[in-house]
Image: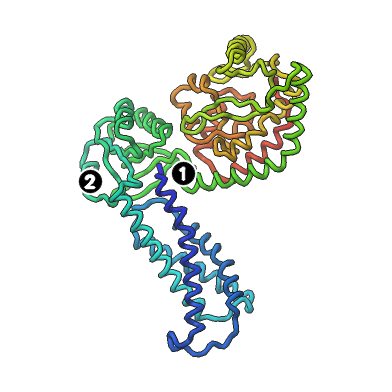
């Protein structure tokens, strides 16, 4: 689990690097345009500063992109600084090659070899210094204030684990604090430790754990947002990241790529896409709102609400109100806070027993008699879900993810089903584009878990595009 402080420092590093690159470029320009500084020969060209600045601002994002590709924005504070400095040198050198190729293709683009080489050298120096200061501040907060410390539970008793325990205890700069060291993988005991002391990571080195115990531990960690790491014994998995911990090979099981920059990238996509979709569908939403209002007035002689708020369970088990266009008669909406709503809940329970097409935690009522005429149409084509773009913009939901379920549905989950709650729910998802509402819950669960384990931004885009194609397919009920 990545700490918020790690995310913040990693995000801040981007503008710091950009500022250092710009500062290095300006310094190189200043040195060359004051020849006396390094006893240089007078310049033989006339390159306006304004044009030079525009070139810098154009090239800086490319340099930052190269830094990102080279892995300079990973979130681990314990990485060795000299290794990071070499990566800065390597990435900046690649950027230098890009600049040289650009000059070769377009000669008038720029003409001072000294400024190019000086900017390269100064960029390496300035970026390394900027990162050194940033790391010192982060390490100081880690050691003196405990900000960003990972609370770790050690499982297993052997020489390797004793060595790791001693290293963690003797070196606070590693960023770990041992909350306990136990011999077994008892989930009940781990729950108790987490409740009493908090828990961010588990490190296991125990060859005696069975595959069943290991699977239960992995599921527990995924459900409770705890990182699972192990010193390899017999465990095999396709979802892992290998590394070295004090000379020992260590493997971390990844629940989802939606950690760190993956989470940031997905959130940026959600914000931009939801704003565009709200603008795009605003005429349709206004029309639907008017039709609901008119139908409500003529049926019950009073204007009922247009938007129906229904409490659902979101990421990490947090409750939120999902927004939908009301497609049911107002007195049939299940609001536990009103007398009519409680009656509607009892009526709904009877309908579930008599007409539900699904078995398990979820229900789907065939030919639901509670729907209005307008409601039947907008529900059939998922138009009722358009207000959920505001849920996405607000951060309660994502455009793509598992569907949000009600508390009474979540209460019927098996323990392993709670993996669906490890990420934000979505307006659409892999299950929706594969079978819409016609899938059985267990099949839907498998597709959603596959999505969680194999997330990518390109996959999100594909699912959004496929959603458009399936919207106009008539539902079975």
Q: Quadrant of the C terminus?
A: top right
Q: Which residue is disc 1 drawn over? A: 259
Which of 19/341 is in front?
341
Q: Position of residue 294 (x, y in %)?
A: 78, 24
Which residue is at 37% across, 38% downward? 228
Secondary structure of the residue carrying numbered label 1: loop
Which residue is at 67% across, 34% downward? 386
Which residue is at 64% across, 75% downward? 106
Q: Position of residue 75 (x, y in %)?
A: 41, 51
The image's colour scheme reads rainbow
* Residue 307, picture quadrant: top right
Which residue is at 59% across, 66% downward? 58
Using the image, tell me which numbered label, if any, was put on residue 314: none
Q: Position of residue 246 (x, y in %)?
A: 28, 51
Mark 2 neighbour density, 10 Å: few (under 14) some (14–19) many (20 or more): few
Taking the image as drawn, is residue 348 in sight?
no
Q: Which residue is disc 2 drawn over? A: 169
Q: Position of residue 304 (x, y in %)?
A: 70, 22
Extreme-front residue of the structure: 302
Mark nearer the N terminus (2 vs 1): 2
393 over 80 or under it: above or below = above
Which of 172/471 is in front?
172
Mark 1 neighbour density, 10 Å: few (under 14) some (14–19) many (20 or more): some
Which of 242/298 is in front?
298
Q: Quadrant of the N terminus?
A: top left
Secondary structure of the residue carrying numbered label 2: helix
Instruction: Tell me how many marks there are.
Output: 2
53 over 248 or under it: above or below = below
Q: CA distance from mark 2 to mark 1?
A: 27 Å
Q: Are marks 2 and 1 in contact (CB under 8 Å)?
A: no
Taking the image as drawn, is residue 57 in sight?
yes
């Amino acid at each position: 689990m990545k700490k918020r402080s790690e995310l913040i420092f990693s995000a801040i590093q981007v503008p710091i690097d950009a500022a250092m690159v710009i500062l290095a470029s300006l310094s190189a320009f200043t040195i060359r345009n004051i020849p006396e500084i390094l006893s240089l020969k007078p310049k033989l060209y006339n390159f306006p500063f304004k044009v030079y600045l525009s070139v810098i601002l154009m090239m800086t994002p490319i340099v930052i992109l190269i830094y990102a590709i080279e892995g300079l924005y990973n979130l681990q504070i314990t990485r060795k600084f000299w290794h990071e400095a070499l990566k800065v040198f390597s990435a900046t050198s690649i950027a230098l090659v890009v600049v040289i190729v650009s000059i070769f293709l377009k000669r008038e683009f720029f003409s001072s070899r000294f400024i190019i080489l000086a900017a390269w050298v100064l960029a390496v120096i300035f970026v390394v210094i900027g990162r050194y200061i940033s790391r010192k501040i982060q390490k100081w907060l880690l050691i003196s204030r405990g900000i960003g410390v990972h609370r770790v539970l050690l499982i297993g008793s052997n020489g390797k684990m004793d060595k790791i325990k001693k290293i963690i205890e003797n070196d606070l700069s590693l960023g770990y604090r041992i909350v306990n060291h136990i011999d077994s993988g008892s989930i009940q005991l781990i729950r108790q430790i987490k409740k009493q002391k908090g828990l961010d990571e588990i490190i296991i080195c125990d060859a005696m754990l069975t595959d069943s115990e290991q699977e239960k531990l992995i599921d527990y960690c995924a459900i409770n947002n705890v990182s699972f790491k192990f010193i390899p014994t017999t465990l095999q998995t396709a979802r892992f990241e290998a590394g070295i911990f004090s000379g020992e090979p260590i493997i971390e099981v990844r629940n989802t790529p939606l950690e760190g920059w993956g989470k940031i990238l997905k959130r940026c996509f959600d914000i931009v896409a939801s704003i565009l979709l709200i603008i795009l569908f605003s005429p349709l939403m206004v029309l639907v709102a008017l039709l609901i209002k008119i139908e409500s007035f003529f049926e019950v002689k009073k204007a009922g609400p247009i938007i129906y708020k229904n409490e659902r369970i979101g990421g990490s088990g947090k409750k939120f109100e999902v927004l939908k266009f009301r497609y049911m008669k107002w007195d049939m909406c299940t609001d536990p806070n009103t007398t009519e709503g409680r009656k509607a809940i009892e009526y709904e329970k009877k309908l579930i027993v008599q007409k539900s097409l699904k078995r398990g935690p979820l229900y789907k009522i065939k030919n639901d008699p509670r729907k209005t005429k307008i409601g039947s149409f907008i529900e059939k084509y998922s138009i009722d879900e358009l207000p959920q773009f505001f849920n996405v913009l607000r951060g309660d939901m994502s455009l793509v993810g598992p569907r949000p379920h009600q508390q009474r549905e979540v209460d019927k989950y098996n323990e392993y089903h709670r993996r669906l709650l490890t990420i934000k729910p979505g307006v659409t998802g892999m299950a929706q584009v594969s079978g819409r509402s016609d899938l059985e819950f267990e099949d839907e669960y498998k597709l959603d878990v596959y999505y969680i384990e194999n997330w990518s931004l390109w996959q999100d885009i594909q699912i959004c595009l496929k959603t458009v194609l399936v919207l106009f397919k008539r539902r079975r009920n």
